[in-house]
Image: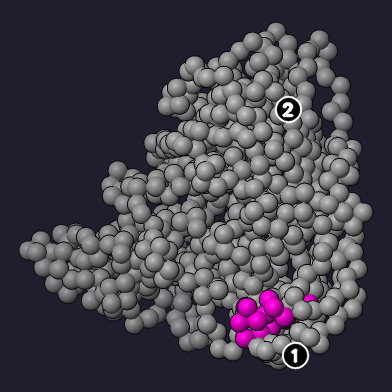
Amino acid sequence: MVYSLAATTLTVAAPLACDTSSAQGSEPHRDGEGVLVTGADEEMLVLEVTRADKVVVRLPRVEVGQGITTAVAMMIAEELDARLADVEIPLADARTKGNQSTGGSSSVSSLYGPARQLAATARARLVTAAARRWHLPAWTLRTRDSMVIAPDGRTATFGSLSASAARIRRTAVPAKPKPASRHRVIGRATNRVDARDLVTGAAKYTGDLTVAGAKPTVVARPPTIGGKAVSVDDRAARAMPGVHAVVRVPGGVAVTAESFHHAFQARDALKIKWAPGPLAALSDDGIRARLRAAVPRLGTPPRGTAQVEGEFAFAFVSHAPMEVLTAIADVRAHKAEIWFSSQTPMEARDTIAHAVGLPASAVTVHVMRGGGSFGRRLTFDAAIEAALISKAARRPVKLMWSRNDDTRHGRMRPASHHRIRASHKDGRVVAFTHATASVNESYGRSAKNGTVSQAVFARPVSSAPAPSDSGLYNFGRISGDSGGVELAMPLGAWRSVDSGTARTAEEIMVDEVARGLGQDPVAFRRTTLRNKAVRAVLDEVARAGNWGRAMPEGHGQGVAVHEEYGSCVACLAEIDAGDPKRPRVTRVVMAADVGTAVNPRGLEAQLMGSAVDGISTVLSAGLHIDRGAVREGSFSDFRWARQRDAPLHFEAHIMPSKGEPGGAGELGVPAASGAVANAYARATGTRPRRFPLTF
């Protein structure tokens, strides 16, 4: 259902699970602000056509670089026949109802129906308004470039019709989205709507905001994870120029000052005695041993079968978004206002309210664009901490976590260990078992008593197969189990959550099974894949990447596939491992079937980013734990792929489809990771087992 809201300009709303077969509203009611609405506005996508010819849709998702604002603008422009430049997609503040989470590669698929229906309904009302103004049959009118056009050439802008369209309840033309055959915007490669703002610095992040009275703030943190301040001598820091406050918080000791320069100087002048954290006696070897021991046994293989087995270890990984965590908080006695980038703003608001002792209705969360996330902004450690500091300091604060803060004390992908066995007989796999163990979080499970961390998205201990088990293939009986190791570490969902490790290990095993059976890895996959769409993307990368071509010594090709989020992808990687300790991926070819690709250029960018993620986590980027502390502190030692590590050649092939959009943001990482690992194995004649390889 799509509804009209009582306003002086055309304003319509669609529930985020709207039925696109109907565009008729119900009887309106009056909300607490005196605005007539026909549904729970908090749960809706709302479109307004302003008198200035702008189409404004306040988005209940967050833009963190993935291009969701561009994709939604394209959906709206398509169905409304508006100029893309006339569509504005600001981010909505935290709501009280509905789903406002950004994650799981679900944004485009969840918004595709509601956004298109919303715009189609607005277009029908605008056309009806023009028909009444000109006394013409509505079916004779057409729309283009944010205008309604009459057969005789007369035009009326959407803005000029907005007020009269707002009064229309029954439209004279159908309010149905276009068939795909009439799409002129959806499916066309399009530059980001915010591209100019991004490259000129006009785009505003939390750090760019000026909030009255909010002073720069940093925190002195313990040398070990979960360490606590035993005593603090802050006399020297308080005496320094520009220092406004020094307060203790659960994560350390905060300094608020006139500038970040002053704040960092004062932080370094603090004399703090730290108690070690709960992991102070534990390092990588101990964690890996615990994980290995926690992997459930694989059981007895089928009689008469031969086995291919492998064990795989994956390190902790930092999210490392380019924009460091920043939050502005203004906590007063009876209300609080917070500004930060959040993938889960409703949960953040409730948690912040609990932490500072206010009702959720008294807390306002303004959602800002984020400079990257990869799952990091699902949690909101910095925002809770900023609120606690603001309350203690009795003033607004602008808190910034340094890169070192987030690398050593922020969320990270949990380390995991995998044990896989493929049982084969008469040239085919008849059983496939994948058992795994991951570090589970037992660190600050709530915001009670001032604890500033919350446990989310850690893999639970269960007896089910891993989410990306190789049911992708005709491998007979599929089974799996999982265990966990409880450690007091701040963990979080990292891009492609479980699949980024599980599928990587599985795709390495698929190559090794093919080798054991004397078959080519691509040919073996083609004969065993269940899904025709997955086979098609595999065929595409094999063709475009010239699979099987002669390679120099020390060079190799690798392939891998993945299916998730209603989409599928294949990747072919080529690697130069002439120096096995300094491998370089030279070429990546990817093909994806995501149903309708709203913006193929945005999808290509997602695939390119996932290729870099795969290169990084397979070859070089991980976190070491030394006596309860994270060794790495910045990009200088957390060795994420840089420009010199990027493939010299990258191409993405988007498979044509008329189906509903699937997910794409997290789709490519498992295939890219598996392809890079398999390319390295073929180039070096080794069997990679620990990742990253050059750790």
Q: Amino acid at mark 1?
A: Ala
Quarter occupied by residue 58: bottom left
Does residue 178 show up?
no
Residue 33 - label: none
The single residue placed furthest to the left in the displayed view is 152
Report helix, strand or loop for mark 1: helix
The residue lying at 30 percent from left, 67 percent from top is 86
Coordinates of residue 39 in the picture (x, y in percent): 50, 72
Quarter occupied by residue 194: bottom left
- The relative height of residue 649 versus residue 195 in the rendered view (above or below) is above
Residue named by callout 2: 478
Coordinates of residue 682 in the picture (x, y in percent): 62, 22
Coordinates of residue 494 in the picture (x, y in percent): 66, 51
The residue lying at 78 percent from left, 17 percent from top is 307
Report helix, strand or loop for mark 2: strand
Residue 239 - label: 1
Asked if the residue under mark 2 is in contact with the one under mark 1, i.e. CB atoms within 8 Å, the reply is no
Q: Residues within 10 Å of mark 1 (few under 14, many from 20)?
A: few
The magenta stretch is 253-266
Quarter occupied by residue 434: top right
Q: Nearer the viewer, residue 168 or 232?
A: 232
The residue lying at 34 percent from left, 66 percent from top is 87
Whether residue 447 sits left or right of residue 627 in the image: it is: left
The residue lying at 50 percent from left, 62 percent from top is 63
Q: Nearer the viewer, residue 498 or 278?
A: 278
